[in-house]
Amino acid sequence: MERSFNSVTRPIYQLLFLLITSFLIWPCTKAAAAAAAEELLKGFEATPNPSIPFFQPLLNDSSSKFSFGFLRVNSTQLALAVLHVPSSEPLWLANPTTLSRWSDRTKVFFNGSLVISDPRTRMFWSTETQGDKLVLLNNSNLQIQKGLDNSNNVNVPTVLWQSFDFPTNTLVETQNFTSTMTLLSSNGLYSMRLGNDFIGLYAKFDSGSDQIYWKHKALQAKAQIIEGNGPIHVQVDPDGWLGMYQNGTTPVDIESFNSFQRSLDGLLMVRLEPDGNLKAYYWSGSSWVLDYVAIRETCDLPSPCGSYGLCTPGSGCSCLDNSTELSSGECSSSGPYSNDMCSDPKTQKNDIKVLRRGGVEVPFKEWMRYETTPSLEECENACGNNCSCYGAVYNNASGFCYILDYPIQTLLGTGDDSKVGYFKIKEGANKKKINSGLGVGVGLLGGAVLCLIGAVGFGSYKIWRNKKRVNRMLEEETGGVMSGPYKDLGSASFRSIEMCSSGHR
């Protein structure tokens, strides 16, 4: 759904297409955004316009830098989004895990709650509030407000709900990120959460529990975290840093960006990317500029080479199994994910294949669970007898046995053969897939042969019938006598018909 800012090399025709498309769409988006309202009151409702290709604005901030409206996804789906108008980049999505259709039956309305409803897919999302109006602030925060708060002699609206409390994959400057929130990558595989004194990045590897793969702990240089004084929170500072706070305005930690203490006019944001990296960007006026990268080495990412992959610094990706090749970012030897990595006790069938590989190491090992065993054999047994263990990596030097209790992802390649990996692969579904593929192939081949036989039979029948008709005509003209040139004519006609039939078959 969302674009990554990582630069890639594109063919010249793709660049020309993107450039032309940008010139066509961007002015339309900007002009439409300029026509959008600056507040939505009770009774407002809207449906998507089928002629709009990208974004249909419903609400603008006063500076027209941000817009809230319908975002078209994959041409047929719809998401409610807050957009950065100059770049057409989505900053926030309402209910990103469930999208509705881009259809005139899909409706958004404000009745005190912001509601989107799609009766055909039964998609329904609501803020469940009783507000007076919906507004978009100059920092891209979408708010539902009610009346005026006269307490403390300050006449400001009461905020019942705001998008800043429900971030998706992006944080913008001045936005607070608290311990109750989660930042989720657009593919749903990675998340960012706060601990008691740290920022953590987690991967969801289909094992039911999350694995931490990056952790930044507060240095507490200018202020201390005091136990019992409340949880920490994080905020993107416009001066180019990510601040960690507990109470007050003095940060307990500062993670500086490249633009640290530089004056920037454009928007600054932090995004959790689909590869699991945390990055910061600022808007230069014409493009997004990379300003910070949490994980600098590719092999330190949670799964840069996919399942059963091997990432070697300086060499790139390969497969743990030397007999398989890396294709489409995955190693074909990877088996299906299963919560039971043991043989089937009912059938006594051993469908677990064991793969051993030397010179490998677990990634982010400082956050991995391990046991101390005296030998490689005992390390392997600890995993082999554990049905929830997918593999183990043993370090002969330290005796550490790292237990992989999630489906095997990318391992690190190292020249140290004393570090040995033991990995389970469940073969059942692979064989089923291969067998079913073979069956389909045989079926298609059999069908093709039958069609060919049928075509040949039909062609032969037509030839026989035409020959018989020609012979009957000749017999009628000669009184039943087939002699000399007429016999040759019949033979030539037959050959001509046969050649045409074979040519068009």
Image (cartoon, grey):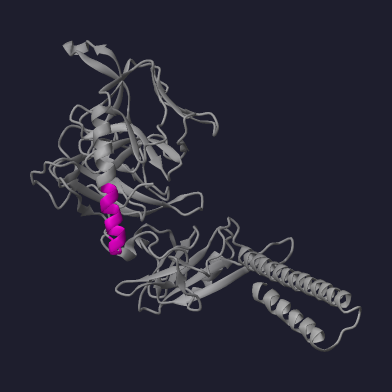
Give the quadrant of residue 235.
top left
Q: Residue at x 63, y 68 (%)?
A: 434
The answer to whether residue 132 is above or below residue 371 is above
The residue lying at 50 percent from left, 65 percent from top is 391
Q: Dominant secondary structure of the magenta stretch?
A: helix
- Picture coordinates of residue 224, whole percent (x, y): 19, 41
In the image: residue 394, left or right of residue 32: right
Which residue corresponds to the image point at 56% horizontal and 69% vertical from the top-left? Answer: 381
Kindly identify the residue that appears in the image at 15 percent across and 42 percent down.
266
Per the image, is 329 magenta? no
Q: Would you say residue 229 is visible in this rendering? A: no
Q: Residue furthest front?
A: 478
Q: Nearer the viewer, residue 490 or 75?
A: 490
- The residue sitting at the bottom extreme is 484
Instruction: Give left or right: position of 396 versus 229.
Output: right
Q: Find out whether residue 17 is within the magenta segment.
A: yes
The quarter in which the C terminus is drawn is bottom right
**Res 293 → quadrant:** bottom left
Q: Position of residue 54 (x, y in %)?
A: 35, 40
For residue 251, side relative to residue 299 (left or right): left
Residue 323 horizontal/vertical position (percent)? 51, 78
**Residue 30 visible in image:** yes
Span highlighted in magenta in the image: 8-22
* Residue 469 rendering spot, x and y as whole percentages: 83, 72
Q: Residue furthest right?
A: 480
Number of numbered tags placed on the structure image: 0
Height in image: 21 above or below 297? above
